[in-house]
Amino acid sequence: MQEREPKLIPELLVRDIQSSLSFWRGLIGFKVIYERPEERFACINLDGARLLLEERQENVRQWVPTELVPPLGRGINLQIEVRTLEPIIQKLSEAAWPLFMAPEVK
């Protein structure tokens, strides 16, 4: 069965594409679908959940309507459905990755 294309794919501006890929691939388990290294861009997927990651660069055409102040991504929540959460939580714990809030099912 062919996987359906998502109808919405969020694009996140990041400070460092390699660090972001280390997090999303290494700790969370996403796979790179395609990337454009020369543009510091990647499309990643986990069980049908997709994200676009693009490194913030000066003098490059990007959607930046106001000054970006760390931490980036404030005010956004992403709900990602995964087959099993425990391995992800374990990897984050082993990496001493701080969670702002514990995962929950609602």
Image (tube, rainbow, N blue to C red):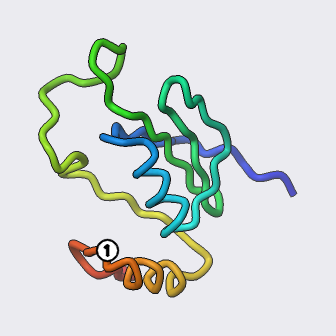
| Residue 6, x across and y down, in percent | 61, 45
The residue located at (43%, 42%) in the rendering is: 17
Where 66 sits versus 94, above or below?
Answer: above
- Please give left or right for residue 30 compared with residue 96 in the image: right
- Please give left or right for residue 81 compared with residue 78 in the image: right
Where 92 sits versus 32, above or below?
Answer: below
Furthest toward the right, the residue is 1
| Residue 84, x across and y down, in percent | 58, 82
The quadrant in which the C terminus is found is: bottom left
Where 84 sits versus 64, above or below?
Answer: below
For label 1, the residue is 97
Q: Nearer the viewer, residue 40 or 11?
A: 40
Element type at marker 1? Answer: loop
The residue located at (26%, 52%) in the rendering is: 76
Where 74 sits versus 27, above or below?
Answer: above
| Residue 48, x across and y down, in percent | 64, 57
The residue located at (54%, 24%) in the rendering is: 38
Q: Amino acid at mark 1?
A: Trp
The residue located at (83%, 52%) in the rendering is: 2
The quadrant in which the N terminus is found is: bottom right
- Please give left or right for residue 22 compared with residue 15 in the image: right
Q: Number of numbered discs present?
A: 1
Mark 1 Cα within 10 Å, few/some/many (few <14, many 20+)? Answer: few
- Please give left or right for residue 29 compared with residue 34 in the image: left
Toward which corner of the image does residue 59 lie, by quadrant?
Answer: top left
| Residue 79, x across and y down, in percent | 41, 63
